[in-house]
Image (tube, helix red, strand yellow):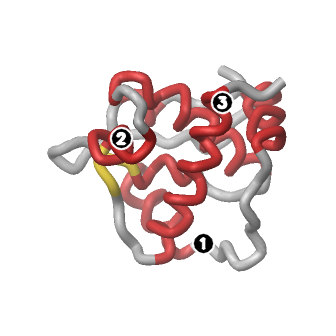
Amino acid sequence: MASPLDTKALATVAFLMDRRESWSVITYRDLAKRLGHPQYGLGDILDRVGAWCRSVNKQSLAMLVIGEHGDPNEGMYHHFKGDADPVTKENYERRRVGLWRENWSDAVLPTVEQIADAYEKLKL
């Protein structure tokens, strides 16, 4: 069953898909403002974004969200069960460039239910 966080994850996917196209990033603070959500609570939303991305065989759009000093929060470095190539501090930049270069021409915005399903299947 979908939650309000899944709805915010859908908005985040749409926003980050656009950011990916322009090879740009956004800070946690700016994303929180756009979503009307507390900055400290973005992890649950970004985990849902990452789960959906993985479900469609894409790298996580959450890699485009960074702190004020240009680095992601520690939460970026946890992984989903069965993740053979998790994002680490050592491979983060390579993976983010890979996300920008990845072909997303076949990607369409998910439904809230698709986000909820992907998150349930890939929960930590």
The relative height of residue 4 versus residue 69 in the rendered view (above or below) is above
N-term mark: 3 or 2: 3
The mark nearer the N terminus, 1 or 3, is: 3
Q: Residue at x 50, y 42 (%)?
A: 87
Position in image of residue 39 (x %, y %): 34, 29
What kind of element bears circle 3? loop
Q: Residue at x 50, y 75 (%)?
A: 21
Q: Quadrant of residue 48?
A: top right
Residue 11 position (above or below residue 1): below
Percent from the top left, x then y, of residue 58?
68, 58
Q: Is residue 90 visible?
A: no
Dot 3: within a 10 Å radius of its alpha carbon, few (fewer than 14), some, or many (20 or more) residues? some
CA–CA distance in space, label 1 to label 3: 20 Å
The disc labelled 2 sits on which kind of residue?
Lys
Amino acid type, label 1: Glu
Q: Give the foreground label among 2 and 1.
A: 1
Viewer can see residue 50: yes
Q: Secondary structure at mark 2?
A: loop
Horizontally, is 42 left or right of 110 in the view?
left
The disc label shown at residue 102, or none = 1
In terms of image quadrants, where is residue 102? bottom right
Pick the residue in front: 69 or 82: 69
Count residues near mark 1 (Cα–Cα under 10 Å), then give few for <14, some for 14-19, many for 20+: few
> Residue at position x 59%, y 53% from top?
13
Residue at mark 3: 80
**Helix, strand or loop status at disc 1:** loop
